[in-house]
Amino acid sequence: MSIATAAFTANDTMTRVASASMNMGQVMLIRGIFATLLIGLLAWSQGVFASPRQARHPLLLLRAAAETTATVAFLVALSRERVAGRGRPAAASTSPATAPDGL
């Protein structure tokens, strides 16, 4: 449990830092590539690819759609959340012409 919490915190921090200099589509692409590789290797080692027909089960497709929606919502919220020690959200512009007054 401690390792999972540490991994989540590290992932959260890396996503916030990356979202400050990249748009959310790029962050999601990089996250998706790494997640696909890691989950694919785990599934292959467990022998899950032996029966690919099961991948088209309606409940599995529903879960995949729900996971995708939740991930997009989480990443968008994470990019808009204020980073500790900073006065602006991570994705806010630092240009004086577009910065709101008082920040």
Image (tube, helix red, strand yellow):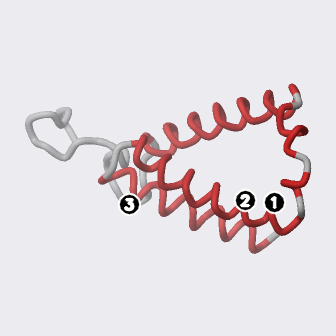
Q: Are marks 2 and 1 in contact (CB under 8 Å)?
A: yes
Q: Residues within 10 Å of mark 2 (few under 14, many from 20)?
A: few
Q: Percent position (x, y) of residue 65?
A: 71, 30
Mark 1 and mark 3: span between their CA atoms?
Answer: 40 Å
Does 79 appear above or below 21? above
The disc labelled 1 sits on which kind of residue?
Ala
Q: Are marks 2 and 3 in contact (CB under 8 Å)?
A: no
Question: Which quadrant holds residue 18?
Answer: bottom left
The disc labelled 2 sits on which kind of residue?
Ile
What residue does disc 3 label? Answer: 85
What residue does disc 1 label? Answer: 43
Residue at the left extreme of this rendering: 97
| Left-right relation of 64 to 55 | left
| Left-right relation of 45 to 21 | right
What residue does disc 2 label? Answer: 39
Q: Quadrant of the C terminus?
A: top left
Q: Are marks 1 and 3 in contact (CB under 8 Å)?
A: no
- Nearest to the eye among marks 2 and 3: give it: 2
Q: Which comes sooner in the sequence, label 2 or label 3?
A: 2
Q: Percent position (x, y) of residue 63?
A: 80, 33
Mark 2 and mark 1: span between their CA atoms?
Answer: 6 Å
Q: Which comes sooner in the sequence, label 1 or label 3?
A: 1
Q: Percent position (x, y) of residue 40?
A: 72, 59
Could you tell me which secondary element the residue under label 3 belongs to? loop
